[in-house]
Image (cartoon, helix red, strand yellow):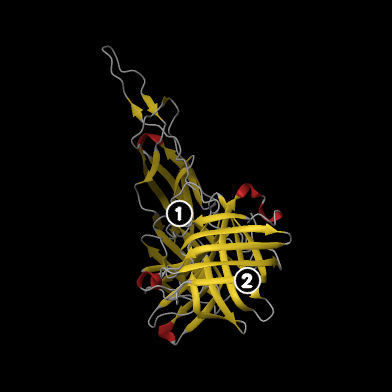
Amino acid sequence: MKKLFAVFALLAATLTACEQDKPEVNTDNLKLKRTSSSVISFGTDGGEGVITYELVEPESEATRSTAPAIPEATTTAEWITDLTVKKSDNKVTFNVASNSGNNAREATIKVSYNDSSFLVMVMQEGRINADKTFTATHVGGTYYGKLQSRGYDYFVILSNMQPESITSIPFGATEYRFDIYAERGAQFDAARRVPVGTYTLDHGRSGEPGTIDGYRDCSYFHDTTAGGESIPYKSGTLTVTEDSIIADITLLNGETHHVEYHGDCIMEDYTEPTYADVYPVSQYTSDITFDVKGGELMPIFRGNWYDSESDVWFVHMIEQRNGFMGVYLLFDFLVPRSNGGYANKDGFVGEYTLLDPSAESWDYTFPAGRLRDDSMQLHAWYAKCENGQLDMSKAAPVTDGTIKVEKDGNEYVLTVNGKDDNGNNIKGTFRGVANTFDNQAHD
């Protein structure tokens, strides 16, 4: 979703023959831009800090007013005091108290004006330095959307090498992995930028925004140079600005680690369909047809999965649920949020076309099928199952066409008229009842 940027002010002087009139202030489309560093460091003694900013006016037909253009600066850290915005020279000043504790600490200062804002990270040394310091050169990971949690799930990897996948780590790599939950999600077609904010390890696994999943398989330190050493976190924080990521962690074995990354905080997402860019994923060399009667559907409501104006119903279906055999189909259906959500069990009935991520509305569309490099099929697929196992030699993503979903009595009827990524037609009808409904959205 696109945000409207806040309205700010610029001074414009109008000269007359006698004297200069009171300057007019333009508050139409000004944006706030940080001009100083996004990370400011202090020793244990603390001191005074300065943040500088600009108000930038894009080209527009600006309306005029006399509203003052004064950003607001806020922080939740008690050790950062005297936070003052100086309009005259576009500065924010603050004081950092001395740190008598053993541990280093960090916090953020948010400078904002309506919807335009930026974060600055304030770091301060502790009396005892970390047992290990590490500077990451790569940010990897993937984005899971909103799955059975109150926050949007990002799996973030800070590494000295390009990350490979969730299940493997290249030899010679040191990786710090964080499964974080954010307040906002990524749009379907957007770069996977790590959301700005501060995240704290949560062993209760609440999934609340601002937390890191404390489960040992989700957030941990791994070093292949030490024989595959893998240690979960005992406690820790992760702070993200627009161009830096800082983590202070205590491992389960008691070691303290300080991790820094400076650069573009966009995840190098190994889940992008690079295989499909080189060769077709489809295993077929001819058209695919099917006609299923007596099948079963398992619809799952995922809500605002892609942080768009549409809800998502994920519907997967099998020809024979007993033994999980026969034709297997899965689709992500994007529907209007006005359909009633999970309460409307027929909310995915409709006619769907292929999603264009740049379109103004995504209602009644489906994303093209893709294969993740951990072999997970996403969005739109035709496949065959035998003896409870998916046969990838008989699988094909649906990358174009239309899908019609109708209700006939207590049965649903899906009519597929599509194509795979090898140019073959995928045509057929699937008729069956809904075996179970599941609600994985927590809006």
The furthest residue to the left = 17
- Residue 299, how many percent across, how many down? 65, 64
Q: Amino acid at mark 1?
A: Pro
How many neighbours does mark 1 have within 10 angstroms: few (below 14), some (14-19), or many (20 or more)? some
Camera-side residue: 384 or 219?
A: 384
Of residues 54 and 182, which is closer to you in this image? Answer: 182
Residue at 48% across, 72% down: 396
- Of badges 2 and 1, the one in the foreground is 2
- Return the residue found at the far bottom: 227
* Snapshot quadrant of residue 19: top left
Q: Is residue 45 visible?
A: no
Read off the residue under disc 1: 357
Image quadrant occupied by the C terminus: bottom right
Do labels 2 and 1 touch, CB within 8 Å?
A: no
Q: Residue at x 50, y 72 (%)?
A: 288
Secondary structure category for the residue under label 2: strand
Residue that badge 2 annotates: 292
Q: Classify residue 262 by image quadrant.
A: bottom left
Q: Position of residue 218 (x, y in %)?
A: 55, 73
Q: What amino acid does circle 2 point to?
A: Val
The residue sitting at the top extreme is 18
Percent across and percent down for residue 232 are 55, 76
The spot of residue 271 in percent (x, y) is 45, 69
Observer able to see residue 324? yes
Q: Is residue 411 left or right of residue 216?
A: right
